[in-house]
Amino acid sequence: MRLNKRLTLILLLLVAIALPFIFRDAYFQQIMVLICIYSILALSFDVLVGYTGQVSMGHAALFGIGAYTTTLISMHFGISVWLSGLAGVILSGITGLILG
């Protein structure tokens, strides 16, 4: 059974890597990125609510802070999305640390 999970994970990873090369439309790639981002957010809610039974709106707030920071830094300062995304992660982490 464990081998089956690994093969499934490897297959999904290969499909995720191949999709941008198959579908070169910018709109479709943007939709794929949004699906991945919201899937990560949904999985974090699943871990918190599903396994621990706690309800938290902090996830949405910190997600918004990180996304807003990334967008503002990328648009106003012309920094790459990867570096501005890292800045968004750091700022939302600091905010969570202060609020926690």
Image (cartoon, rainbow, N blue to C red):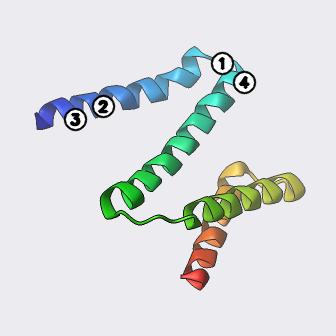
Q: Position of residue 64 (x, y in %)?
A: 68, 58
Q: Which residue is identified by label 3?
A: 6
Sequence order check, earlier mark of 1 and 2: 2
Tags 1 and 3 touching, CB below 8 Å: no
Question: Which label number is shown at residue 27?
Answer: 4
Q: Nearer the viewer, mark 1 or mark 4?
A: 4
Residues 67 and 51: in front is: 51
Q: Amino acid at mark 4?
A: Tyr
Residue 83 sits in quarter: bottom right
Q: Position of residue 85 (x, y in %)?
A: 66, 56
Q: Position of residue 93 (x, y in %)?
A: 58, 72
Tags 3 and 2 touching, CB below 8 Å: yes
Total numbered labels placed on residues in the image:
4
* Residue extending furthest toward the top: 22
Q: Position of residue 6 (x, y in %)?
A: 22, 35
Residues 45 and 35: in front is: 45
How far is the residue under mark 1 from the one under mark 3?
28 Å
Dot 4: what SS?
Answer: helix
Q: Amino acid at mark 1?
A: Arg
Q: Which residue is identified by label 1?
A: 24
Q: Residue at x 21, y 34 (%)?
A: 5
Q: Residue at x 80, y 60 (%)?
A: 73
How far is the residue under mark 1 from the one under mark 4?
9 Å
How far is the residue under mark 3 from the one under mark 2?
6 Å
Q: Residue at x 37, y 28 (%)?
A: 12
How far is the residue under mark 2 from the one under mark 4?
26 Å
How far is the residue under mark 1 from the one under mark 2?
23 Å
Sequence order check, earlier mark of 3 and 4: 3
Q: Is residue 39 above or below residue 90?
A: above
Q: Which residue is identified by label 2?
A: 10
Sequence order check, earlier mark of 2 and 4: 2
Question: Which label number is shown at residue 100?
Answer: none
